[in-house]
Image (cartoon, grey):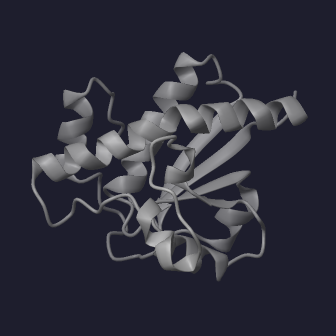
Amino acid sequence: MTSPYRIMTVCTGNICRSPIAEVVLKARLADAGLRDRVEVWSTGVSSEEHGNPIDRRAAAVLREAGYTVPRRAARRVTAADLGGADLVLAMTSGHARRLRDLTDRPVIRMYREFDPEAPAIDGLADEHRLDIDDPWYGGMEDFRTTLAQVEAGADGVVVEVRRALGER
C-alpha cells in the first residue's frame, strides 16, 4: 500500500482559517472517494494560540453549513511538517513567505489558486489578492465569507489531488 497524499493548510494561529480549510477539504475529499488516500491537517505560523481549540465562531459557521467539527488543538508549523507534506496551502501571501523561510521544497501554494473565480494576480504587487480574509476581528458574517472563500477553492484542490495521485 502506498502512503497517503498529505495536505497541510496554514494560517496565523491555527484556530480560524486553516482549520476551516482542513474541515472543508476532508469533507470534499471524502465526497470524492479519496478519504483513504489523502491526509489533511492544519497548522499556524505563530504559536500564540498553541493548544487552543478551533475558534467558537469558526466552529459555529462550519456546523451551520453542515460540517462536522472535530476536537483539535492549535499548533505551530514545523520544518518536519513541511517535509512530510505533498501540498502546503497557505491562507495568505504572508503565510507563504514565512513557510518558504522554513523550506526550499516547492510544495507551498496559495489556497485561493484553486478557486476559478479568485482574482488574477500579476506579480508580487498583487500577490495579496489571493489572501483568504482573516475573520478574527470581525463578526459571524466575516467567518461566513472566509468559509465561502475556502469552499470556492476546495473542488480545485480535489482536482489537483486527483492529478497528483494519477502521477504516483
Q: Residue at the spot x=66%, y=31% of the render?
A: 159
User: How far across and how far down the image is residue 162, in percent?
Assistant: 73, 29
Task: In the rendered view, tell whether residue 164 sits above or below residue 55.
Answer: above
Q: Is residue 164 left or right of residue 87?
A: right
Q: Quadrant of residue 110?
A: bottom right
Q: Quadrant of residue 69?
A: top left
Q: Is residue 72 left or right of residue 85?
A: left
Name the foreground residue: 26 vs 110: 110
Using the rendered image of the protein, determine whether residue 168 is visible from the camera's viewpoint. no
Q: Quadrant of the N terminus?
A: top right
Q: Is residue 59 left or right of residue 18?
A: left
Q: Residue at the spot x=36%, y=68% of the render?
A: 13
Q: Residue at the spot x=76%, y=65% of the render?
A: 106
Name the foreground residue: 42 vs 115: 115
User: How far across and how far down the image is residue 34, in percent?
Assistant: 65, 23
Pick out the residue farthest to the bottom: 101
Q: Is residue 7 left or right of residue 145?
A: right
Name the foreground residue: 159 vs 68: 159
